[in-house]
Image: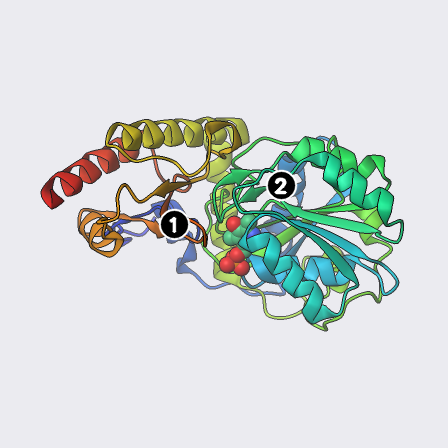
Amino acid sequence: MYEFIPDNPYILLTPGPLSTSKGVRNALLRDWCTWDDDYNQDIVQNIRRRLVTLATRDTGAYTAVLMQGSGSFAVEACLGTAVPQGGKLLILSNGAYGKRMVEMAEVLGIAHTAILLDETEAPDANIVTAALTADPTITHVAFVHCETTTGMLNPLAELAQAVKAAGRTLVVDAMSSFGGIPMDIGELEIDYLISSSNKCIQGVPGFGFVIARRDVLGQCDGNARSLSLDLYSQWQAMDQSGKWRFTSPTHVVRAFYQALDELEAEGGIPARATRYQENHRILVEGMRALGFQTLLPDDLQAPIITSFLYPNERFDFKAFYEAVKARGFVLYPGKISKAATFRIGNIGEVYPEDMRRLIEVVREVVETAK
Ligand SMILES: *Cc1c(COP(=O)(O)O)cnc(C)c1O
């Protein structure tokens, strides 16, 4: 490890990007050759195998495809490749990321229909069943697992079951939950799961990935509506030799490998999930004790990011944000239209002691402002 990796000036509670470890940032510091085995085999192929292992016990049925860009690029590559010309996509949306998939379908010219729920409304699996019964031309269904817009945890198992019982192909945006919430995508029969380097795996931003059923992705040759965001062709190229079709973000990929090592050292996804839950518990209990209320009831809340209501009409978020940042923590503005909120994430290289310190900082800032 190099000596000069600096401490971060603050902790990012903004997933994502989120705060990463020194080990991850240290791993960025050398260059890699993209045609040698020490990159393609030992890093890229290794990452792909480990991602599948993290996602399911049924490792033979799935493959992992990495895609340059932020998480949205991977979502767009997945939707644009998964749905064939004659197919039709149903999008279940209760937040900005669900809406973004609707926009993608529009731009890509994918036949689609959407169930648009309120941001604070929990989706019920029965509405999916009803929509699929009413429209037999729907071939694919997509929804978000943890809606980072609000912090809502959508009912993955129930929704997945409704989609699979109706015999449709299932795409799940698990961007902000994969690696932080245990799940087995084989058991859930998810066909495509999408996430990115800079969320719960705790890498730096630069690529997304799709963990896909081999037999399902195998039918997608020629579907893509984009040359570079072609998940099938990227898979084919990567499967040959670990080579990305176009320039791969080598440093980011190497840092992600380090992040996977650190996830393993922590005890895997169950241990990470426990830490996030503890972070979340300390955050919510602490904020409530200071008079803040959460936007969502506890039973809809994911242990990833939490929306808090402004405590009163005089609340000046900008001043609050600056004061908290000056004391070492960066918060996240709200993203919903109906209520004045701000958000605090609890994923990343963040520990219970950091969350306790955050609560002390918020207390100090609130009292100074009185
Ligand atoms: C972060 C995130 C994305 C991707 O956002 P990018 O800014 O493109 O990385 C997509 N969906 C969800 C639910 C997310 O949290």
Instruction: Single out the residue that lies furthest toward the front.
Output: 313
Label 1 secondary element: loop
> In the drawing, does residue 137 fall left or right of residue 353?
right
Rendered view: 290 above or below 335: above
Q: On the rendered image, what quadrant is the C terminus found in?
A: top left
Q: Which residue is mark 1?
A: 14
Q: Is residue 43 visible?
A: yes
Instruction: Give residue 135's position: percent from left, percent from top.
Output: 86, 50
Query: Which residue is rendered at x = 46% and y = 26% of the image?
Result: 274
Task: From the viewer's side, name the closer residue of 357 and 241.
Answer: 357
Query: Which residue is rendered at x = 52% and y = 42% of the image?
Result: 120
Instruction: Give residue 350's position: percent from left, percent from top.
Output: 35, 38
Amino acid residing under circle 1: Thr
Q: Which residue is mark 2?
A: 50
Rendered view: 365 above or below 240: above
Q: Is residue 45 visible?
A: no
- Figure quadrant of residue 66: bottom right
Scheme by which the image is coloured: rainbow
